Amino acid sequence: MEFTYFDKEQEQSLRERLAQLQRSEAVLSYAQLQGFLFALACSPETIRPCEWFDLIWFNDEPQFDNEQEARSFYRQVVALSEHIADMARQRRFLPFSARYSELWQSELSQWCEGLLMGHQYLEDLWLIAIDDLNDQTVCENVDTALSLAATFADVINARQLSFEEGMELTDDHLPEAYDLFWKVLGTYASVASLWAEGAWSFDAEQLFLALEPAAHDEACPCGSGEVFSKCCLH
């Protein structure tokens, strides 16, 4: 199936379709969908649309009047997912300007809700990838990204928690937090490629060592510490 580039006309059409669906069904808002699809775009492993499409609905099953309407909606959502993945590759992580503004705080909140929902869906996969990378900086940045997403998803609750902990979160702190959020999302979006590179370099090295000739009295290239004559193939 081919999908066209996601343009402004498609965006408006999908916004209207989701708003219409929300009148009768429990479905993600457009901003929540954007955050959710960003999380999927950053997944350590590729997740096909057929695996996540039904998650757009919370507890309901997708309902359409006819097959043509269902196919049209599916194409729009997948086109948006491809657009978001392309933007992430260009280091454009958030669908907002680089400078924080209260004007789109509501949509940012929903975007972060979607991101957290998508991350939770992939949580087991993320745990494996982070553990394999074994990089403290990457781990800390991913944790910071999720913590800031939770903050912006519910600023009122975040302010209450910060007050209880003796660290008041004010409006003056939000622009700085947003700048940091943008930066750590860069690490969040890079985990998949870092993990893939690590897996490939390990496999390539092992293959090279396995093919490298070794004398019977030399150390075995498998890395066991035994001489070749007493290790591999013996």
Image (cartoon, rainbow, N blue to C red):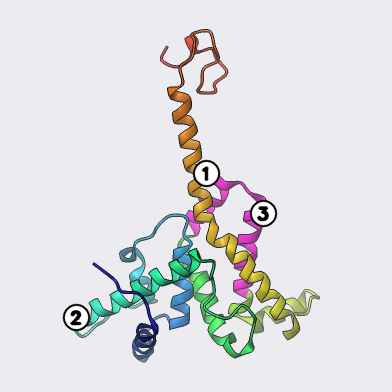
**Secondary-structure class at tag 1:** helix
How many marks the image carries: the answer is 3
Per the image, the residue denoted by label 3 is 137
> Is residue 111 shown in magenta?
no
Q: Nearer the viewer, residue 88 or 159?
A: 88
Q: Position of residue 1 (x, y in %)?
A: 23, 67
Give the spatial CA distance, label 2 vs label 1.
43 Å
Pick out the residue farthest to the right.
166
Q: Local crowd at mark 2 within 10 Å, few (<14), some, or many (≥20)?
A: few
Q: Earlier in the sequence, mark 2 or mark 3?
A: 2
| Residue plotted at (57% across, 18% down) | 225
Q: Answer above or below: position of 101 versus 36.
A: below
Q: Is residue 227 left or right of 164 when viewed as pictured?
A: left
Give the spatial CA distance, label 1 vs label 3.
16 Å
Q: Answer above or below: position of 212 versus 131.
A: above
Q: Answer above or below: position of 110 versus 181.
A: below
Kindly identify the amino acid type of the residue bearing the numbered disc 1: Gly
Kindly identify the amino acid type of the residue bearing the numbered disc 3: Thr
Q: Nearer the viewer, residue 102 or 205?
A: 205
Foreground: disc 2 or disc 1: 1
Find the magenta span and give its range: 123-150
Can residue 142 be spotted in the picture?
yes
Can residue 61 be spotted in the picture?
no
Q: Earlier in the sequence, mark 2 or mark 1?
A: 2
